[in-house]
Image (tube, grey):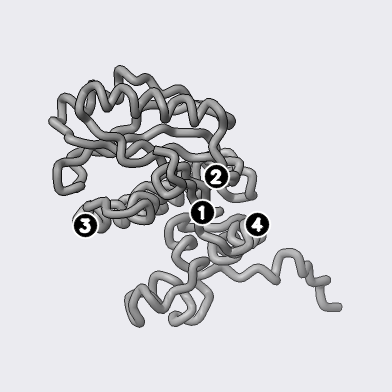
Amino acid sequence: MNPKINYAQTTHVCIKQWAEDDRPREKMLKKGISALSDAELIAILIGSGNRDETAVDLAKRILHSVHHNLSDLAKLTIADLQSFKGMGEAKSIHIMAALELGRRRKETERSALASMQSSRDVYEFLAPRLIDLSHEEFWVLLLNRSNKIIRDVCISRGGITGTVADLRMIFKSAVEALATSLIVCHNHPSGNPSPSKADNDLTNKIKQAGDLMDIQLLDHIIVTETTFYSYADEGKL
């Protein structure tokens, strides 16, 4: 009599048993990195799966949980990633580090053209830093007479519903950089770009302080994942 087959033990095939063209690393070397799917790229980062899944299968399951949206993947925490079987701290850190490198690369490319001529320019420059955050951050762009960025500074980091921006820190940074104008920006994790009363009050204080110091406030941008609010565009400055 033939022994009973345990299908739970025989259906899983490890990546090393795949055809060479189907293995992510070998496929990359043979066909180039652009030939790899998102799941295959993540599989290379995590290296191995678990007893029931290959690294590619595990990567597919992680992507499925965020509807295959890499922006949503970037919002996951280490704890979120570790909730998947086979994802330890080291593997989770690998994924987060790779996503952060991608974000910084975009940042570097934008910095080469960092002349702020419109509210859209400001949004495109700062949105990659802010749209994936679950908390508020307040940033200031310090500009020269040509509206080119001298320096960008994070003034404060806060909670889900707000952050506190200190006028003294804003203008200390501006004076040290010899800035002639500035643009301030913060994010609304809620997705609603409409300014609050606190946002309006702070904007007025920054404008008044800037007028006294001859450092013009050009705009205050409120960033969300899909859109933004500009005080300048709305005629509020």
- Residue located at (44% from left, 39% from top): 236
CA separation, marks 4 and 3?
A: 36 Å
Near mark 3 (Cα within 10 A), the count class, few <14, some 14-19 or many ≥20, is few
Q: Nearer the viewer, mark 1 or mark 4?
A: 1
- Quarter placement of the C terminus: top left
Which badge, 4 or 2, is on the more N-terminal residue?
Answer: 4
Near mark 2 (Cα within 10 A), the count class, few <14, some 14-19 or many ≥20, is many
CA separation, marks 1 and 4?
A: 24 Å
Which badge, 1 or 3, is on the more N-terminal residue?
Answer: 3
- Residue located at (79% from left, 71% from top): 5
- Residue located at (58% from left, 38% from top): 79
Which badge, 2 or 3, is on the more N-terminal residue?
Answer: 3
Q: Amino acid at mark 2?
A: Pro
Would you name the residue on which mark 1 appears? 227
Q: Position of residue 202 (x, y in %)?
A: 44, 26
Q: Amino acid at mark 4?
A: Ser
- Which of the numbered marks, if any, corresponds to residue 193? 2
- Displayed quadrant of residue 218: top left
Which badge, 1 or 4, is on the more N-terminal residue?
Answer: 4
Q: Nearer the viewer, mark 4 or mark 3?
A: 3
* Of residues 113 and 229, the one drawn nearer to the viewer in this rendering: 229
- Displayed quadrant of residue 209: top left
* Of residues 170 and 189, the one drawn nearer to the viewer in this rendering: 170
For label 1, the SS is loop
Residue that protrudes farthest toward the front in the picture: 235
For label 2, the SS is loop
Above or below for 86 versus 140: below
CA separation, marks 4 and 2?
A: 27 Å
Would you name the residue on which mark 4 appears? 65
Would you name the residue on which mark 3 appears? 113
- Displayed quadrant of residue 212: top left
CA separation, marks 1 and 2?
A: 7 Å
